[in-house]
Amino acid sequence: MENVEVLLVEDDPNDAELVLHVLKKTNMANEVLVVQDGKEALDFLFCRGVYDGRDASHFPRLVLLDLKLPHVHGHEVLKQVKENEKTRSIPVVILTSSDLDYDITNGYKLGVNSYIQKPMEFEKFQETVETIGRYWLTLNKTSAG
């Protein structure tokens, strides 16, 4: 679990399975951790709860974040990640079904790196995930790579 490349925060098991399938099929991410709510995402990133003792120096290369999550809303997850000096440089992409102006505006105000509405069509969803993975995991450069 130390080498998580992508943290997928998604409460819809079908969407999570499709994202996993695309990332594995395209060999863009070997280690994907799926969490189903905002609280677990924060626990992982900040080494709390069941993730207490996790090496706090290993962060995912990308967080794919849904907004409408149980326990802690995606905007709150984003806020805490971007306010913390240790986690603020982790790229966070909101991948959600919402196209509400408030969700988009608030996401960028809180520091999201990209906001993408999930396509409803299966093939378009696959293409979108592949494009996200290609950009953030292979083309985008970070200070570590």
Image (cartoon, helix red, strand yellow):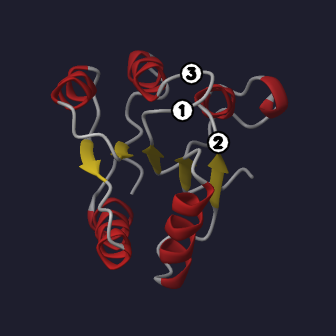
Q: Residue at 47% of width from left, 29% of height from top?
A: 87
Q: Residue at 21% of width from left, 32% of height from top?
A: 100
Q: Amino acid at mark 2?
A: Gln
Secondary element type, mark 1: loop
Q: Is residue 124 left or right of residue 54?
A: left
Q: Nearer the viewer, residue 144 or 52?
A: 52
* Circle 2 residue: 36
**Residue neighbourhood size for the residue with mark 3, other residues' Cα within 10 Å, grouped as few (<14), some (14–19), many (≥20):** some
Quarter of the rendering occupied by the C terminus: bottom left
Q: Earlier in the sequence, mark 2 or mark 3?
A: 2
Query: Could you say which disc has been placed on residue 94 in the image?
Result: none
Q: Is residue 74 left or right of residue 140?
A: right
Q: Is residue 47 left or right of residue 96?
A: right
Residue 50, picture quadrant: top right
Secondary element type, mark 3: loop
* Circle 1 residue: 69
Secondary element type, mark 2: loop
* Circle 3 residue: 72
The answer to the question of whether label 2 and label 1 lie on touching residues, with beta carbons closer than 8 A, is yes
**Residue neighbourhood size for the residue with mark 2, other residues' Cα within 10 Å, grouped as few (<14), some (14–19), many (≥20):** some
Residue 27 percent coordinates (x, y): 50, 80
Q: Amino acid at mark 1?
A: Leu
Residue 82 percent coordinates (x, y): 38, 23
Position above or below: 76 against 68: above
Q: Amino acid at mark 3?
A: Val
Residue 132, picture quadrant: bottom left
Q: Nearer the viewer, residue 27 or 72?
A: 72
The answer to the question of whether label 1 and label 3 lie on touching residues, with beta carbons closer than 8 A, is yes
Q: Earlier in the sequence, mark 2 or mark 1?
A: 2
